[in-house]
Image (cartoon, rainbow, N blue to C red):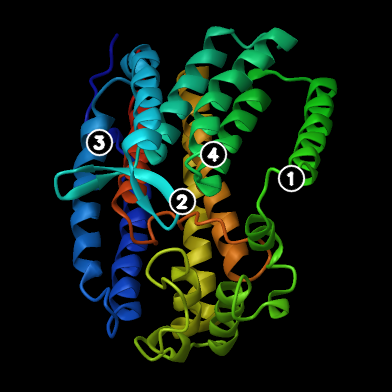
Amino acid sequence: MRRILSFRDFDWTLLGMVLLLCAVSVLEIYSATLHTKYAGFHTKQMYWIAAGLAAMFFFSKIDYHKLIDLVPWAYGIFLVALVAVKLFGTKVLGARRWIKIGPMHFQPSEWVKLILILLVARYFANLGGRSLTWRDVFKAIALVGVPMGLVLIQPDLGTALTYTPILIVGLFLGGINIRQALVLSICGVVLVAGVWTSGKLHPYQKARLTSFVNPDNDPKGTGYQIRQSLIAVGSGGVWGQGAAKGTQTQGAFLPIPHADFIFAALSEEHGFVGALSVLLLYFFILMRLIQNAQTAADLSGSLIIMGVVAVLTFQIAVNVGMVIGFMPVTGIPLPLMSYGGSSVLFTFLALGVAMNVRMRRFVN
């Protein structure tokens, strides 16, 4: 007997935690930009959140199997969009990442993450859970590697790196064996070492990637952002300096406090307690998603949700690691916290597809 699909199967607990995180985001963006040229961005963030919510509910009602069937077409369209970005995109801070459509800027590389989550789920589900051959592995790498290469030449290293966990989770859940994983790991290390020593990277790019090790070597140059972030986090203490009272944030020492460094602004204003509360909220959201993956009706559903978990976990780890000086500055936003329409919409769409899988766990 077919079970009727309704919003009673919607994960309202997960949505509640997500909305709580969004509320923290809006308040922190307001606080961090109060006396800057970015004042008012919290209102724009609210619009993006509202649009994201609408998109999430819409996508949750479309059978994810239909989305999987259509994803090869979407993959092709977005490959063309990535090429168009390189040829005609708007150049900001030395990189072409956006296509201007009227008054809005569209960043295809953010949306590619969702396409790859669906595509990788389709690919490994079609293999039926059998042991992977090297041919299977190389095909999967190629599917993810092509858009990654197109994003790297924009250049946008941060966004390109977010595609990697989708591939890793797909390979792991798809049936890769230990020997294959070991060989790929060694090849990955050799490839990175080769690129690093090949001379392809400019000195400023190398400096940016290594400045987090000792930012005091160039405190006014490549180490400036991390140094100011560390000062902001440290000055927050246990309870923080209070909303709109952070000296680094309000004094405009902390770079882009509403976007990449919003966690540093939060730590300065609300201290260790506030930062830990947000991290715990992320933990509960991820655990809830993993629980939904375990109850999915099929392998493709599990792969979709775990792909979402992989991307969110990677972005959280890299952004927070960057803020506290454990990672290089790569421009990866903090999901649902950092200001930005493309990032917010991607996250809500990804959550919508995850909800989609949950709502169909009992549907025959």
Q: Residue under circle 4?
A: 152
C-alpha span from label 4 to label 1: 16 Å
Element on which disc 3 rests: helix
Callout 4–callout 2 Cβ contact below 8 Å? no
* Disc 2 target residue: 285
Q: Which residue is mark 3?
A: 8
Cα distance between the residues tagged 4 and 2: 30 Å
Coordinates of residue 50 in the picture (x, y in percent): 19, 52
Which circle's residue, 2 or 3, is located before the other in the chain? 3
If the image is split into quadrants, where does the C terminus sit?
top left
Which residue is pictured at 44% across the width and 35% down the height?
A: 113
Viewer-nearest of discs 4 and 1: 1
Q: Are marks 1 and 3 in contact (CB under 8 Å)?
A: no
Under mark 3, the amino acid is: Arg
Which amino acid type corresponds to the residue marked 4 in the rendered image?
Leu
Q: Considering only order in the chain, which callout, 1 or 4, is on the residue closer to the N terminus?
A: 4
Location of mark 1 (residue): 199
316 left or right, relative to 178:
left
Considering the image in quadrants, where does the N terminus appear? top left
Q: SS class of the residue under badge 4?
A: helix
Residue depth check, mark 2 versus mark 1: number of the one nearer the observer: 1
Task: Measure the C-alpha gap from mark 1 to mark 3.
Answer: 57 Å
Q: Residue at 53% x, 14% y: name it.
A: 123
Determine the secondary structure under disc 2. Answer: helix
- Residue 309 or residue 221, whichever sits in front: 221
Residue flagged by tag 1: what amino acid is it?
A: Gly
Q: Which tag, 1 or 3, sits closer to the chain's start?
A: 3
Is residue 290 in view?
no
| Chain-order first, disc 4 or disc 2 | 4
Q: Secondary structure at mark 1?
A: loop
176 to 25, vertically: above or below: above
Q: CA distance from mark 3 to mark 4?
A: 42 Å
